[in-house]
Image: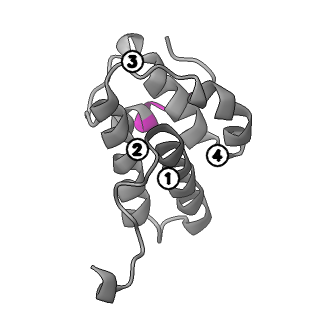
Amino acid sequence: MLSDNVSVNTLRLLMGQTKVDTGSVPEEILLLAKAIDDPYSLPYLIEELNALEIKEEEMVRFALVRVQIDSELRMNEDIQMHQRRRFVAQVMEKLLFGEVLIEMGAPLEEI
């Protein structure tokens, strides 16, 4: 079920696969994709994200980390778009898991 004009490229990134059967994408991934593709929808999805019953926590966590990594790598292509995507992924990760696994943009002294 592919709804709300979710990008297949976003689904591939979230799933960590080059080919995705859009009919078998888990509901939680579709919700993440909706927010990633339309960052301005995030404020309206907070309750739905908070109520989300995650079946595979590791899959969702890695999906959000992949978005953050991809956004950092592509930042020079469209800085505003990728800053928004990274921000949305970090907010969702913080909301769902209580912390952000990878802090991007940390000064080298802290690494």
For disc 4, the marked residue is: 39
Q: Is residue 47 magenta?
A: no
- If you read the primary sequence from the N terminus, does the residue marked by circle 2 or circle 4 appear first? 4
Label 3 to label 1: alpha-carbon separation:
21 Å
Q: Which residue is mark 2?
A: 64
Measured Cα–Cα span from mark 2 to mark 4? 14 Å
Q: Main secondary structure of the magenta part?
A: helix
Give the x, y percent position of residue 20: 32, 24
Say if mark 1 contacts mark 2, CB within 8 Å: yes
For the magenta stretch, what is the residue range?
A: 6-10
Q: Amino acid at mark 4?
A: Pro
Q: Indicate which disc, 3 or 2, sits on the residue closer to the N terminus.
A: 3
| Residue named by callout 1 | 90
Using residue 74 as the reference point, say whether residue 79 is left or right of it.
Answer: right
Q: Please identify the residue farthest to the front as the structure is shown.
A: 98
Mark 3 or mark 1, which has the lower sequence index?
A: 3
Q: Residues within 10 Å of mark 2 (few under 14, many from 20)?
A: many
The residue under label 3 is: 25
Q: Nearer the viewer, mark 1 or mark 4?
A: 1
User: Seen in the image, is 92 located left or right of residue 12?
Assistant: right
Rounded to the nearest angstrom, the CA distance separating label 1 from label 4 is 12 Å
